[in-house]
Amino acid sequence: MGEREANALINYMEKKWQDSNRELFQLCLNTFATKLELKEEIAKIREDLVRVESRLETKLASVEGRLETKIASVEGRLETKIVEVKSDVIRWMFGFFVAMLIAILGLYLRK
């Protein structure tokens, strides 16, 4: 093999090597994300998170309002029941007191 054939072989191998490297580089560009693409995706995700956070805050405020209303309603009913129980206790105490007074007077007058 002469010098001319050797140079042709070397040129052929270099061209194939460059073509192979170019194809590999193109494959990498097509397959993997670039830093710019990653930054854009991160920005989109942050925007989505801000929207979701604001919607959650709105829903949380709504739920808190409904919960406070229900708690106030339950407190009102509970206070009403407590007042009813107090009046029942006072009536029973008065009835017991009157019965005891009548019994004591009956025993006193019996002598």
Image (cartoon, rainbow, N blue to C red):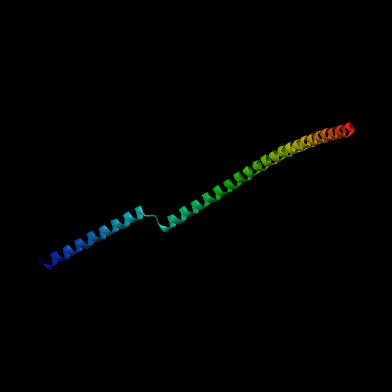
Q: Quadrant of residue 83?
A: top right
Tell which residue pokes out farthest to the front in this image.
Answer: 111
Quarter holding the N terminus is bottom left
Instruction: Answer with left or right where residue 17 lies relative to residue 96.
Output: left
Q: Residue at x 80, y 36 (%)?
A: 93
Up/down of 68 relative to 30, above or below: above
- Spot occupied by residue 56 in the image (x, y as percentages of width and height): 57, 46
Among the 4 quarters of the image, the one containing residue 60: top right
Quarter placement of the C terminus: top right
Q: Residue at x 78, y 34 (%)?
A: 92
Look at 68% across and 40% down and name the residue there: 69
Residue farthest to the left, as pictured: 1
Residue in view at x 88 percent, y 31 percent:
110
| In the foreground, 39 or 55 | 55
Q: Is residue 29 left or right of residue 16?
A: right
In the rendered image, residue 61, in percent from the top left (x then y), is placed at: 63, 45
Q: Position of residue 53 (x, y in %)?
A: 56, 49
Report the front residue among 90 and 55: 90
Q: Position of residue 10 (x, y in %)?
A: 18, 64
Q: How many marks?
A: 0
